[in-house]
Amino acid sequence: MPKLYKITKNLFTLTPSSNIYSSANVNFLIDKKITLIDAGTSNDPGPRNIRKILNSLGVPPRIDLILITHSHVDHFTGAKKLKKVFNPQIFAHYLTEQAIKQYSDFRNLGSFEYWEFIEKTFPIVRKTHFIKYLISFMYRRSFGNFEEFQLDKKLKEGDEINLGSFNFRIIFTPGHSPDSICLYEPNKKILFSGDMIPYTPYIHTSISDFRSSIKKLINLDVKLAIRGHGKPQIWQEEKPRYMHFLKDMDIAKLRILKILKLKGPQTAHRMANSVFQRTHLIHKTIYTNLMRVSVFWILKYLEELEEQGKIKSQLIKNRLIFSLK
């Protein structure tokens, strides 16, 4: 069930009605303008539930502005329906425009973020279109259909957005996605961090970008971090998670190099259990066993090591083999 959390007298976070890991929060900022930070999906929460929330808060059922943190389905695909009903302006990073075009046809399986990983991890998928279309159908069923929309403003690093008592500074934080941004309010020391806490990698996730973006955030003067998923976090507790991930990235790369040195050429699958050890129990059970997210992360580390010239890859008998260079 969705739950509305009051953060300040005019700032609220609505958790999704579905699973908090697969669907994103929608944040309500009630000031001179009524602003949403992220739009959810076409199904969750949707215009009807948002109207109910606004009525319950005693404000006019309108939306003046939607700020999108990044272009993943659970954060931005609800924007078109909200545009039709409330006619807000929609702001997002300028790279989000490319993602909108990619998502404009959900029948285009190339727009499904996990597709390349799924094909690498489950070779049988390459051999039949039925599985592809079944997964695509389930994807649309969960998140709803997507309609293309236009951005009213394309944001970039350092832009400021004044919303009355809130004055946000845009921080460009690629890593989770190429167009990820965080919204920082320096006077109130609040950070809207989107999906910067990294649990799940995507086809466009970049380890190098994650590292640079995290380093931007850990030096900010913050008291409260408002995530795209789950409850708001006290910064004293959230910051160590960023630091821990920075350390994890270095450890993972060292483990990969050590395995390749001691055991010789390896597949990503063979290395996964030895390298990736950071997920908590729920993620390990769901993602590692069902979606093999550990292999997805290993592939990202391997990409970076190959870019740095430390390893090389070869396709041998339809298997991608990695070795020291």
Image (cartoon, rainbow, N blue to C red):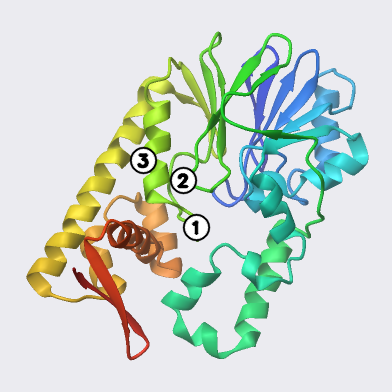
CA separation, marks 3 and 1? Answer: 16 Å
Closer-to-camera residue (183/43): 183
Mark toward the start of the polypeptide (2 vs 1):
2
State the count of labels. Answer: 3
Residue at the far front: name it: 309
Mark 1 secondary-structure assignment: loop
Q: x, y (%) of residue 166?
A: 66, 13
- One can see residue 169 in this view: yes
The circle on residue 211 is 3
User: Which badge, 3 or 2, comes first in the chain's sequence?
Assistant: 2
- Whether residue 238 can be seen here: no
Q: Mark 2 — residue?
A: 175
The amino acid beneath tag 1 is Tyr
Please tell me which residue is depicted at 62% across the width and 19% down the height of the picture: 168
Give the secondary structure at mark 2. loop
- Identify residue type, mark 2: Gly
State the residue position of label 1: 202
Q: Residue at x 44, y 76 (%)?
A: 120
At 57% from the left edge and 24% from the top edge, which residue is drawn?
158
Residue 210: x, y in percent?
A: 41, 43
Tell me whether the residue at label 3 lies in contact with that at label 2, contact meaning CB atoms closer than 8 angstroms.
yes
Under mark 3, the amino acid is Arg
Residue 86: quarter of image: top right
Image coordinates of residue 84 in percent, x first then y, are 91, 43
Quadrant for the N terminus in the image: top right
Proximity of marks 3 and 1: CB atoms separated by less than 8 Å: no
Could you tell me which secondary element the residue under label 3 belongs to? helix
